[in-house]
Image (cartoon, coloured by chain):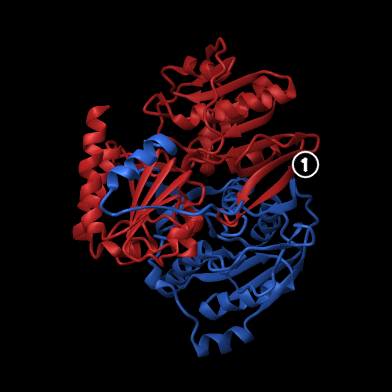
Chain colours: A red, B blue
Amino acid sequence: MSVLVYAETDQGKLKKSAFEVASYGKAVADMMGTSLSAVTFNAETAEELGTYGVAKAMNISTTAAFDAKVYASGIEAAAEAVGATVIVVSSSADARYLTPLVAMGMAAGYVTNVVAAPEGLSPFTVKRSAFTNKAFTHTEITAEKKIIGVSNNAFGLIEQPTDCAVEDFSPALAAPAVTVEQVDKATDKVTIADAEIVVSGGRGLKGPENWHMIEDLADTLGAATACSKPVSDMGWRPHSEHVGQTGKPVASNLYIAIGVSGAIQHLAGINSSKVKVVINNDPEAPFFKAADYGIVGDAFEVVPQLIEKLKAFKAQG
Amino acid sequence: MKILVCISHVPDTTSKINFVDNDTQFDTNGVQYIINPNDEFGLTRAMWFKEKDGAVVDVINVGGAETESTLRKALAIGADAAIRIDTAALEASQVAKEIATVIAAGGYDLIIAGRESIDYNGGMVPGMIAALMDASYVNNCVGLEISDGKATAIREIDGGKETVSTQLPLVIGAQKGLVEESDLKIPNMRGIMMARKKPLTVQPASAVSPLATTSTYEKPAPKGEVKLVDADKVDDLIDLLHKEAKVI
């Protein structure tokens, strides 16, 4: 009986979500009175997981590109090696891709979008978001082995410094199921999934030629850019930026919506963001009911001022 | 080529979400049901394979008789036959196992399921089906071409896209981008008439036990009032975000 977390890396560096799943895993391990291990792939500094309570990190080195089947087999082998009965994973696109394979391989009960530490161990019940953040469910994992997918930014980082033993782990991995032909990834941009701050634009911006305002504001804040559904449907911005019920969910610390009216599907998708700001010239826009802070005003006047003042604020440190 | 599209029967995206019986049941009162949007993007792509390559397209749902109107809509859009597995859909692994049984008997080359349903947002049925079939699998699929038994698929990844090639049988997790919103078909009268005559087979469930069960529901706490800042005083907003919200 122990707890295992799958701590993800990007170019060898542990992602923030790796520390969040470690923090969550530590909370579960403490409840169960057991130790916490982690499995990583190609991590250069796996010992950093010790800061969040991981006592043992098993690092698998592979030269191949990410492959759901290969990675799933490595995680299963690690779970077997430490006798894990609970596995904790993030909500990244890759984690969501591979974890159903792990769950079927281990006959484990897998629950995604979990927003808090387990409510109890017997029964093993977790709170998860459903209906695109319009509700929560209290769900019991009845299988003996349990996998928890933690919602992005829901649990946070909790430091519990522990000596972390890092070991090379070389299980027999599955053969890749797909051949990666090409990867197009902007490496210099913050992704919506990982961003602390997201700046989003809607139809109120009048056209794609005005998006430099959104990008300037995002650059000033180190934020990711996003958009509403009509904006992506009209082709002003790529689908990958569409946030909402049929687009991407956003769980950032700060979400700034500019010229977005706030359709119910959009609000559902961004509801797990902690602080929401709306800038819109229509005081009746539904977004004002969902926001924490708002400015009623013309985006073309307010946003340039906001960029200028934020630059001054950042310059002061 | 034989294609199976998995169809979830979900509340319309504009639905108000409420619960009854001490928050143990979803309140279906006044709720309109639709084909899960991610499944509909997949179904529309399947129709393209039907028109171009003569693919046969079946649709499947795990659920009670109330889901048949949604399956009929999929038939009206152009699917050839529908299968309903007659049991309540309780949990992803149970649904995946029921569907995998049909796939094993049906000899499908391509299985399409939405990357997640918009009600329970589990996001695991396509992956679980792939695991059960030991088939190739591409989630968050935003592009798919098939020729000579080989598939080229585009997967949306955090921050970009990845193009992969693989063999059939293949399971994909469909989403927006696989087809455009404007490509979605609204069933016409002829389609609706024809759908009435197409086969909708009801099959008994194979009594799979779920690995998780939901006991109660909860709505998010109501939100406080928005704090309005004057449009001429953006400094005040920066101050609030820094000192009060502590997010910058």
Name the amino acid type tagged 1. Thr
Q: Which residue is mark 1?
A: A142
Residue at (50%, 51%) from the top-left corner? A271
Q: Position of residue A242 (x, y in %)?
A: 38, 56
A255 to B196, vertically: above or below: above
Task: Indicate the quadrant containing the C terminus of chain B: top left, top right, bottom left or bottom right.
Answer: top left
Q: Quadrant of residue B24?
A: bottom right
Density class for disc 1 (Cα within 10 Å; few <14, some 14-19, many ≥20) is some
Q: Nearer the viewer, residue A238 or B104?
A: A238
Q: Quadrant of residue A14?
A: top left
Task: Look at the image and tell me whether residue A243 can be seen.
Answer: yes
Q: Quadrant of residue A145?
A: top right
Q: Nearer the viewer, residue A51 or B163?
A: A51
Would residue B171 be found to the left or right of residue A260 on screen? right
B94 to A103, vertically: above or below: below
Residue at (53%, 16%) from the top-left corner? A50
Q: Position of residue B175 (x, y in %)?
A: 46, 58
Q: Nearer the viewer, residue B181 or B247?
A: B247
Q: Position of residue A221 (x, y in %)?
A: 30, 39
Q: Secondary structure at mark 1?
A: loop
Give the chain of mark 1.
A
- Numbered label tally: 1
